[in-house]
Amino acid sequence: MDTKRAMEIYNSKDTFAVHLGGQSVWIENVDEANGMATVQVGSNPLDTQTVSCDRLKEEGEA
């Protein structure tokens, strides 16, 4: 996923299915300047990772 799309999802009131390595994640923050996103993995709010936006996949995206 590109950084622009990650920002759209982050700023949206709607919910989108986003995955990182097959796991569901919730985008908590997007660093547009560096193309990075901080995501919550699964339902554990303490399990966060900062990853490159291009590692994120929207459901249905190849």
Image (cartoon, helix red, strand yellow):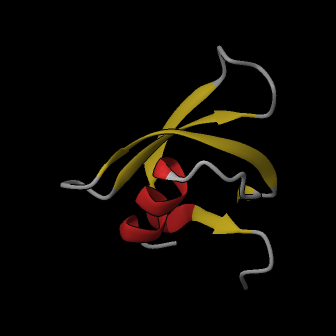
Residue sticking out furthest to the left: 33
* Rendered-image quadrant of the C terminus: bottom right
Q: Residue at x 65, y 14 (%)?
A: 46
Residue sticking out furthest to the top: 46
Q: Residue at x 77, y 58 (%)?
A: 17
Left or right of 39, for residue 51: left
Q: Residue 39: x percent and y percent?
A: 56, 38
Does residue 46 lie above or below 19 as drawn? Answer: above
Q: Residue 60: x percent and y percent?
A: 80, 79
Does residue 47 lie above or below 14 as drawn? Answer: above
Q: Quadrant of residue 9?
A: bottom right
Q: Residue 27: x percent and y percent?
A: 56, 43
Left or right of 25, for residue 24: right
Does residue 30 lie above or below 45 as drawn? Answer: below
Left or right of 44, for residue 2: left
Left or right of 44, for residue 8: left
Q: Residue at x 70, y 57 (%)?
A: 18
Q: Work out whether residue 51 or residue 31 is closer to the camera in this orientation and state it.
A: 31
Q: Work out whether residue 3 or residue 7 is closer to the camera in this orientation and state it.
A: 7
Q: How many marks?
A: 0
Does residue 20 lie above or below 44 as drawn? Answer: below
Residue sticking out furthest to the front: 13
Q: Residue at x 69, y 68 (%)?
A: 58
